[in-house]
């Protein structure tokens, strides 16, 4: 059966019998119904494409019965347009151009994602202090306030705050504009702190080299299973607030097992931004990725 | 998830296509939504009605075709069809199945006038 309009295999088109798919492929007008009957109809106008073929029998050609109520020569009343376009195509286009620019500059862009309150900003502030004079810039996403960008700027780093208003995530166009304003230096870090939200930011590519998911040990071991999209999309997970683990009976092995359950490839680091435990491994991870950009 | 946003993406594409193909109205719009796309059907239907007002797709019928979830099993290396993100591999029972499809959200086609 024809996959375009669902009629039987052989049709008459361009004065010969051919397969229906072939007729569609060649864009030829053709008739429908059992093929043998069609051979008796050698008139191309009667055998017009099915959308325009009047359907009231052979002795009564009634045009204008379609949904538009009128007939325009050469134009069918209802057409099928194959689109096959991703709904997020626009975002993905902006993301691809961000990625090209960042890769050309050798900038390592990391999209930091987590629920609100997991310690992203504190981790970033400690990271910036620890990285010393390595060039870097920060894009902060929140629904409201410039509190986070203010905290980042207090460390001496350049930061841009994006307020999404009602938006639940950053998108690639917002980040593209922020990159234009920040003009990141070649071979530098660009940290993008997404809106605190374990759902929506997973679907929006920003042009980053990798997503880093931050999960604090106070949030519950089941979070990777409850919000799998985000942890599936992440390359690295940071188990943060390690210093609090004993106070909330956190089962670190279970956290890691659940992370690997939703993403067998995920890398995991245990860390406390407060005490500095695990910071050395995180910094080594960052430096290795930045070197990888230069190659 | 953010169905309002997705509906706006659909509207953008409809308007682009209307300019490209010169049509005035969309009667049927078909979306392919993967099982793991995180799209809530009823929320998208609601957002679609609201967001399409004033566009060629105002009043259009929205059809959603669900595409199956697919995953790569890290234990037996097969690509398998799965219903849930956390389902075990139907072939070997392994639990390390990483989604490898089923996150599609795209406009398949539309009937236009």
Image (spheres, coloured by chain):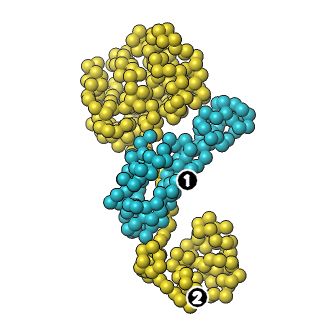
Chain colours: A yellow, B cyan
* Residue denoted by label 1: B65
Residue at far right of view:
B92
Please state the chain letter of the residue tagged with numbered disc 1 in the rendered image.
B
Disc 2, SS: loop
Tag 2 subunit: A
Q: Is residue B37 above or below residue A61?
A: above
- Residue A145: give x, y in percent of width and height: 26, 29
Q: Gap between marks 2 and 1, in whole Å?
A: 37 Å
Pointer 1: residues within 10 angstroms few (<14), some, or many (20+)?
A: some
Q: Is residue A225 left or right of residue A273?
A: right
Seen from this angle, which residue lies furthest bottom? A59
Whether A14 is drawn above or below B84: the answer is below
Q: Nearer the viewer, residue A36 or A21?
A: A36
Q: Which element is circle 1 on?
A: strand
Q: Position of residue A23 (x, y in %)?
A: 61, 73
| Number of the label disc, if any, that sits on residue A58 | 2
- On whether disc 2 and disc 1 are found on a single subunit, the reply is no
Question: B87 left or right of A194?
Answer: right
Number of numbered markers: 2
């Amino acid at each position: 059966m024809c996959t375009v309009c669902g009629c039987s295999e052989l049709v008459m088109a361009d004065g010969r019998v051919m397969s229906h798919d072939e007729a569609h492929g060649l864009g030829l007008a053709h008739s429908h119904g059992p093929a043998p009957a069609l051979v008796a109809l050698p008139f191309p106008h009667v055998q017009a494409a099915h959308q325009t073929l009047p359907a009231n029998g052979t002795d009564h050609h009634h045009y204008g019965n379609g949904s538009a109520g009128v007939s325009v020569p050469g134009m069918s009343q209802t057409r099928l347009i194959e689109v096959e376009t991703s709904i997020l195509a626009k975002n993905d286009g902006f993301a691809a151009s961000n990625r090209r620019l960042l890769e050309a500059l050798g900038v390592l862009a990391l999209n930091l994602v987590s629920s609100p309150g997991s310690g992203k900003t504190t981790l970033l502030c400690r990271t910036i202090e620890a990285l010393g004079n390595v060039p870097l810039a920060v894009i902060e996403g929140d629904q409201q306030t410039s509190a986070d960008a203010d905290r980042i700027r207090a460390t001496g780093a350049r930061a841009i705050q994006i307020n999404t208003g009602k938006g639940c995530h950053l998108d690639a166009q917002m980040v593209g504009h922020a990159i234009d304003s920040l003009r990141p230096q070649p071979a530098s870090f660009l940290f993008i702190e997404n809106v605190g939200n374990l759902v929506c930011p997973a679907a929006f590519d920003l042009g980053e080299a990798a997503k880093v998911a931050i999960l604090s040990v106070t949030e519950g071991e089941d979070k990777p299973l409850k919000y799998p999209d985000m942890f599936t999309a992440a390359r690295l997970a940071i188990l943060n607030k390690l210093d609090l683990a004993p106070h909330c009976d956190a089962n670190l092995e279970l956290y890691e097992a659940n992370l690997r359950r939703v993403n067998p490839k995920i890398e995991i680091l245990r860390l406390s931004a407060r005490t500095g435990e695990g910071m050395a491994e995180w910094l080594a991870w960052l430096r290795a990725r930045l070197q990888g950009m230069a190659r | 998830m953010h169905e309002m946003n997705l509906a706006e993406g659909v509207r953008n594409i409809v308007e682009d296509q209307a300019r490209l193909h010169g049509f005035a109205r969309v009667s049927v719009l078909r979306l392919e939504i993967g099982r793991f796309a995180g799209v809530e059907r009823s929320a998208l239907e609601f957002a679609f009605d609201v967001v399409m007002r004033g566009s060629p797709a105002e009043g259009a019928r929205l059809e959603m075709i669900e595409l199956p979830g697919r995953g790569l099993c890290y234990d037996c290396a097969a690509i398998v069809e799965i219903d849930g993100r956390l389902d075990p591999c139907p072939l070997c029972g392994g639990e390390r199945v990483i989604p490898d499809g089923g996150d599609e959200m795209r406009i398949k086609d539309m009937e236009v006038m």
